[in-house]
Amino acid sequence: MQFLQDFWPIIVFFVTYKAADIYMATIALMVALPMQIAWQWFRTRTINKMLLISGVLVLLFGTATLVFKDNTFIQWKPTIANWLFAAAFLMSQFVGQKRTVAERIMGEAIELPQKLWNQLNMMWVVYFTLLGGLNLLVAYNFDEETWVNFKLFGTLAFTVVMVLVQAAWISFKQPRTETQ
């Protein structure tokens, strides 16, 4: 359920784009993401930092898109967000509380040695870096509608694949316990 909740602003963007155009879809996204942030605050009294960063970027790049009537700004937003996330994951291995971002997110659910947390964290660095680059590849080499489709279906597909690869990797790397 959380996974769908995380993607609903993108779904709102997609549906609005199909019904209207990129500018109305940008407005819809600029409304949906703050609503998602408010809902998260209402439910948990905390706001996920990645969600907050994404929200700020949507408002900045969305405003530029609307003011300058140039969809390039909103097309760059996913890349900037993904590269900022990659940088945060990478920096967490060298700066801070001696725990990677991956460990902070999943440390309550699984137990891994620090070496494996670092490897898992680097998987996310690579994922976010590649996804950001792929977004630009699609934005600059295909038409707007293809980019919008990629934004929903491509991002969702790559995220599902990454989560499945991560789950398989964790399952393979976790120590086996003998049952008698």
Image (spheres, rainbow, N blue to C red):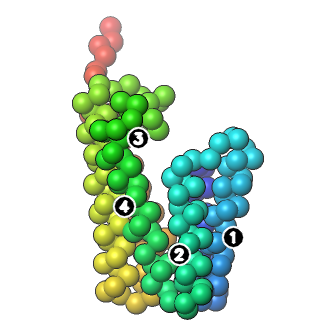
Regarding mark 1 in the picture, which secondary structure is present there?
helix
Name the residue: 43% across, 81% down.
147
User: Outermost residue, right direction?
Assistant: 42
Q: What's the distance in space between the residues labelled 4 and 1, CA to CA?
A: 23 Å
Q: Are marks 2 and 1 in contact (CB under 8 Å)?
A: no
Q: Position of residue 52 (x, y in %)?
A: 57, 55
**The one of 110 and 98 positioned closer to us in this rendering:** 98
Q: Which residue is mark 2?
A: 61
Badge 3 crowding class, 10 Å Cα cut-off, few under 14, some 14 to 19, many 20 or more, is many
Q: Distance of mark 3 from mark 1, alpha carbons?
A: 28 Å
Instruction: Count how many numbered circles sit on residues in the image.
Output: 4
Q: Give the SS element for disc 4.
A: helix
Q: Is residue 79 above or below residue 93?
A: below
Q: Earlier in the sequence, mark 4 or mark 1?
A: 1
Distance from the alpha carbon under mark 4 to that under mark 2: 15 Å
Residue drawn at point x = 55 percent, y = 81 percent: 64
- Residue at label 4? 83
**Residue 14 in view in this figure:** no
Pick whichever, 163 or 49, lies toward us. Answer: 49
On residue 101, the disc is 3
Q: What amino acid is found at the position of numbered circle 3 in the picture?
A: Val
Can you identify the residue that label 1 sits on?
31
The three-letter amino acid code for the residue at tag 4 is Trp
Q: Nearer the viewer, mark 2 or mark 3?
A: 2
In the image, residue 44 above or below residue 21: above
